[in-house]
Amino acid sequence: MSERTLVWGILNVTPDSFSDGGHFLAADAAIQQGLGLAAAGADVVDVGGESTRPGAARVDAGTEIERVLPVIEALASEGVTVSIDTMRGSTARAAVDAGARYVNDVSGGLADPDMARIVAELEVDYVAMHWRAHSATMDQHDVYDDVVAEVRDELLKRLQALTDAGVDGNRIILDPGLGFAKVGEHNWTLLAHLDELRHVGTRGQSQRVLIGASRKRFLGATIARSGEQQPPPEQRDHATTAVTALAAQAGAWAVRVHDVRAACDAIAVASAWRNASTGAR
Ligand code: PMM
């Protein structure tokens, strides 16, 4: 692997996002936040209008589009590479028409039967995340015998369904869906076996893998001091950055994070370390 891991900056344009608490609901504030992520070094700004935090209720398509479209238009017109984080094909289409270059679907095409066909028509790169159920009920689906084998098989099924619907396999990026229908140790096991997830295909080809660990509950549980409450999401950035360094080392194509500058620094460190390990002594 020669190219460095890319950084996707998170821009949740929602009032109930668990991590930014709705501070960026107003389009202008969201646009400024997105430009800030790009200035901090984000390769892609991932714009979402529907919260997927555990237990979250769905928003309707109209509200979702209303939240994200002005933000995508403004960021794209400023030359920022934008991704749309949506489970709806109609939102994906509107976002790509407004300038988005990636579709990031946490349901991997399962939530909307039209998504695969629309993505095939749009001819954009598509993130297919491992997903079992909507956020309201996903915690009831977190049972695995072998989490790596099951996530890998379920991702392979999505890959096949998407390519059957006409999506170019080279355009599909896979994501283990950390925190989605997973309990603490599942997330660590998946991270520790990233390589098996990259090589899901039966023909030995490898897929790009995106990792979204930023500020998630399993990090809070890991860094909690004994006798204390888990640190809240905003205090999980150092742990996130440690995951970024290790994910870069393990060959992740991209990480999706809140703290973009820290991720860029971690990736620069991982690259320097790797280059030195193969260079002259
Ligand atoms: N996590 C969230 C939202 N979108 N997309 C991908 N591809 N992978 C993820 O892990 C992922 C995602 C939830 O986190 P947030 O509320 O901080 O955006």
Image (cartoon, rainbow, N blue to C red):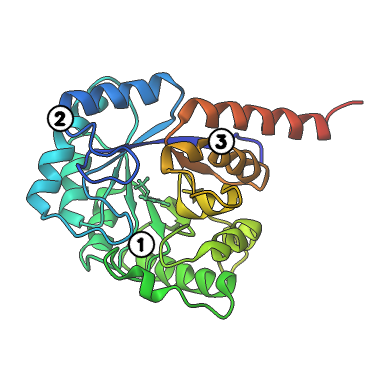
Q: Amino acid at mark 2?
A: Ala
- Of the 4 image quadrants, the one containing the C terminus is top right
Instruction: Say left or right for 253 vs 138.
Output: right
- Of the 4 image quadrants, the one containing the N terminus is top right
Residue depth check, mark 2 versus mark 1: number of the one nearer the observer = 2
Label 2 and label 1: CA atoms lie apart by: 28 Å
Asked if the beta carbon under badge 1 is closer than 8 A to the nearest atom of ligand 1, the reply is no
Tell me the residue that label 2 is attached to: 26
**On screen, residue 71 above or below 226:** above
Q: Quadrant of residue 247?
A: top right
Is disc 3 in contact with disc 1, using a CB cutoff of under 8 Å? Answer: no
Q: Amino acid at mark 1?
A: Gly
Q: Residue at x 68, y 34 (%)?
A: 270
Instruction: Say left or right for 109 vs 254.
Output: left
Residue 60 percent across, percent down from the top left:
10, 55
Q: Which mark is residue 108?
A: 1
- Secondary structure of the residue carrying numbered label 1: loop
Tell me the residue that label 3 is attached to: 238
Label 2 and label 3: CA atoms lie apart by: 28 Å
The number of numbered badges drawn on the structure is 3
- Secondary structure of the residue carrying numbered label 2: loop
Count residues near mark 2 (Cα–Cα under 10 Å), then give few for <14, some for 14-19, many for 20+: some
Is disc 2 in contact with disc 3, using a CB cutoff of under 8 Å? Answer: no
Is disc 2 in contact with disc 1, using a CB cutoff of under 8 Å? Answer: no
Q: Residue at x 42, y 43 (%)?
A: 233
**On screen, residue 33 above or below 55:** above
Q: Amino acid at mark 3?
A: His
Q: Which mark is residue 43?
A: none
User: Furthest residue to the right?
Assistant: 281
**On screen, residue 220 above or below 109:** above
Q: Residue at x 18, y 39 (%)?
A: 68
